[in-house]
Amino acid sequence: MTTDPQATTSGATSVDAAATAGGAAGVPAPAEQLRGAGLRVTAGRVAVLEAVAGVPHATADDVVRTVREALGSVSVQAVYDALHALTEARLLRRIEPAGHPARYERRVGDNHHHVVCRSCGVVADVDCTVGHAPCLTPSSDHGFVIDLAEVTYWGLCPQCAAARAS
Ligand SMILES: [Zn+2]
Ligand SMILES: [Zn+2]
């Protein structure tokens, strides 16, 4: 993203607007993403993608609740099936903090990490700060061709830390 001072004061803005139309930060619409991944576009899958977009690091229960608000009655199994298919197609990323329910997010393919609160389970993203994926170099790779480093930081979120201190 460049900061061209002329962009806000001249006709150049219309070019920028056209280039980014159709989705925030160039993210394609859910239906397009499904087609791009070779998946059939169904109302359930679109609703699941939208639910996870609205609640980053959503649990399956969160997704069921949100999808039911959008579509009415949808079976838990249908939502689980959609989560599974979307994760397999890499449209969703599934993270599984030990001792906590799995979480789903739309932020895929960037090898970011997570910090998890030991007390309440809240999850936040931690960007990779050094280089490209994999951002951690193992002391021994055991001959593997490594393409992902997944780090979970554990601690207390600000709310839980404040509650303990008081
Ligand atoms: Zn907490
Ligand atoms: Zn994340």
Image (tube, rainbow, N blue to C red):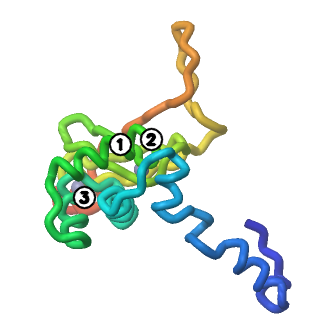
Residue labelled with disc 1? 85
Residue labelled with disc 3: 63
Q: From the image, tell me which residue sits under label 2.
A: 89
Helix, strand or loop status at disc 3: helix
Residue at image x 50%, y 45%?
Answer: 38
Of tags 1 and 3, which is closer to the observer? Answer: 1
Seen in the picture, residue 146 relative to 104 is either above or below; the reply is above
Q: Residues within 10 Å of mark 1 (few under 14, many from 20)?
A: some
C-alpha gap between disc 1 and disc 3:
14 Å
Looking at the rendered structure, the secondary structure element under dot 1 is helix
Asked if residue 75 can be seen in this view, the reply is yes
Query: x, y (%) of residue 153?
Result: 37, 40
* Left or right of 70, for residue 143: right
Q: Amino acid at mark 3?
A: Val
Query: Of the residues shown, which amino acid type is indicated by label 1?
Result: Ala
On the picture, is 157 further left or further right than 73? right
Q: Residues within 10 Å of mark 2 (few under 14, many from 20)?
A: some
Contact, mark 1 vs mark 2 (Cβ under 8 Å): yes
> What is the number of callouts on the image?
3
Tell me the element at label 2. Answer: loop
Vertical order, 63 against 151 (above or below): below
Q: Nearer the viewer, residue 117 or 8?
A: 8
Q: Residue at point 59% right, 73% down?
A: 22
Give the mark nearest the N terminus, 2 or 3.
Answer: 3
